[in-house]
Amino acid sequence: MKHKFWWIVAALVSMWLLWMTLRPQERVTADLTYITTPAAARGISIPFLISFLGNIAVFIPLGAAAAFALSGKSLKTRVLASSAIGAALSAVIELTQLAIPSRVSGFDDWLLNTAGTFIGAVIAVAVNRAH
């Protein structure tokens, strides 16, 4: 039952990621002003915040949920399989964004999204081992 719960969480996170990343860029930018405005006031680059940190941060929950769902597997399998799930979803997103005029697709986004999924999986494995 616990595994099923985490797969549902992973599916919901995936749907949120698809919704968030396939909307028009202008809408996403407007929705993030509550984060970007204070960051810019503190001298943090908005492209750095959104492109670098954002691409990593938004995929961490997917990596964690997938790793928890795979809790019966070896640590290596949990991290690699979770990372592969994130890489595959990110590839779908980046390829779909090619067809959306207001979106920008890139290999760097795919790489950062995959890194975020990996980080989430490592965190979940660490938390699971600590308990």
Image: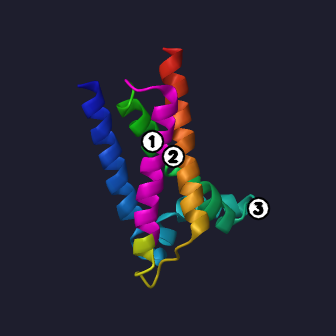
2 and 1 marks in contact (CB < 8 Å): yes
Residue shown at 50% from the left, 40% from the top? 80
Going by the numbered disc 2, the residue's amino acid type is Thr
Q: Is residue 34 above or below residue 5?
A: below
Q: Residues within 10 Å of mark 1 (few under 14, many from 20)?
A: many
2 and 3 marks in contact (CB < 8 Å): no
Query: Which marked residue is nearer to the observer: mark 2 or mark 3?
Result: 2
Q: Where does residue 113 sit, x and y in percent of width and height?
A: 53, 55
Q: Residue furthest left?
A: 1
Q: Which residue is mark 2?
A: 117
Extent of the magenta region:
72-94
Q: Where does residue 107 sit, x and y in percent of width and height?
A: 58, 68
Disc 3/disc 1 C-alpha distance (Å): 34 Å
Q: Quick one: label 3 or label 1, which is nearer the N terminus?
A: 3
Q: Which residue is mark 1?
A: 82
Disc 2/disc 3 C-alpha distance (Å): 28 Å
Q: Which residue is mark 3?
A: 43
Please indicate, yes or no, whether residue 99 appears anywhere in the rendered image.
yes
